[in-house]
Amino acid sequence: MSDDAEVLTRIEGRVGRITLNRPKALHALTTAMCRTMSEVLVDWRGDPRVEIVLLDHSGERGFCAGGDIRMLAESGARDGLEAREFFFTEYRLNHLLFTYPKTVVAVMDGVTMGGGVGLALPAARRIATERTTFAMPETGIGLFPDVGGGWHLPRLPGRAGLWLALTGARIKAADCLALGLATHYVASGALPQLKAEIIAEPQNLDALLAAHGSDPGPSPLAAHRADIDRLFAGDSVEAIVAALEADGGDWGRAQLDTLAQKSPQTLKVAFRQLELGAQAADFAQHMALEYQIGARVVTLPDFIEGVRAVIIDKDNAPRWSPDSLAGVTREQLDEIFAPLPSNQVWRPLPGGEGGV
Ligand code: QUE
């Protein structure tokens, strides 16, 4: 392992440590990074030298912004095969973390979005700091809240997960704690000492987290939790938009303005994804569904246009197609959600719980 590797992996004390190390891209995940992490986690699964796993990032600029979106869009504009390979590999890592037999500690210090959320939420201990910004922003680029978002989000209280999925709202540490997205709050200045103590005595993990934990302050979202549960209760995206229009309040109007900027098609994809994820028998079954969706969505015009508007040209003026919710038909959604041929189906890595 060299210091310029995109993921640093090593055993420190009795802690397996994985450090995202692609700071110029806010540690956005590549296929190779996901593969490296899965390989080392498989090695450590049965390694008695490793008691717990600590997942963090190098530098100051956030935990993980998501995936290698430019690559995905370029691939989607061709045949989508490289994008499929990325999703296949990334979702295997998400599943490996979700079923991992040892305690994983994720340090969500800074931007934690998209792919970063997929790494953090399966971890049993999830530390937020005053720098944490959490979001699933995919509907803004014509993608959908993948990496297990369809499993995790509908399991949050009330309709908060659906609100996060549709609006791509960015929330801070206190809201992450209130929704159960984070389990602990630690001031970023206390992290170096906390990490050193975890490495010295991983068997005392929970006592160390409690000792270094502090109060994130009040949850700004508390003022809107009832509005979210009431206004996002509808059984379709159209019903939610109608409820927001009928409400007439300032907060509701702000949500409408936000939803109006998102891809109508992926709003409907996300809604159906979370409905199905809420009913899924297990995480593996759900990730196979997300892979079906992802394989289709990357080749559709909205994803390529969304990446152009938000990531490449940064004009933030995507021209969606269809350009209205009414234009997105049930038949189009059925095609996006249709099963793949049996030789293309996603499966978890062998060997773990739920493996083949
Ligand atoms: C939606 C996304 C991503 C995003 C913005 C979205 C995403 C992602 C990044 C990203 C990557 C590297 C960076 C950066 C942002 O942005 O997946 O600033 O340096 O990786 O609206 O899904």
Image (cartoon, rainbow, N blue to C red):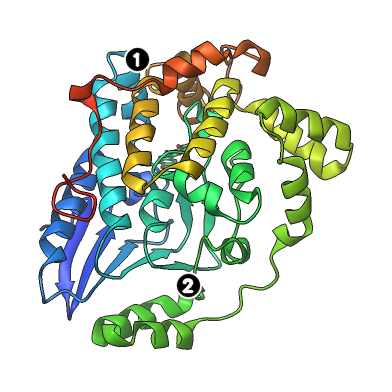
Amino acid tagged 2:
Ser
Other-residue count near label 2 (Cα within 10 Å), few / some / many at <14 / 14–19 / ≥20: some
Ligand 1's image quarter is top left
Q: Image check: 244 left or right of 78?
A: right
Q: Is mark 2 within 8 Å of ligand 1?
A: no
The residue where tag 2 is placed is 188
Other-residue count near label 1 (Cα within 10 Å), few / some / many at <14 / 14–19 / ≥20: some
Separation of disc 1 and disc 2 at Cα?
Answer: 40 Å
Rendered location of residue 250, percent (x, y): 86, 42
Task: Please state which of residues 264 and 215 is positioned toward the viewer in this rendering.
Answer: 264
Rendered location of residue 30, percent (x, y): 27, 40
Q: Is residue 10 above or below residue 64?
A: below
The residue where tag 1 is placed is 77
Rendered-image quadrant of the N terminus = bottom left
Q: Image check: 162 left or right of 101?
A: right
**Point 16% across, 64% down: residue:** 45
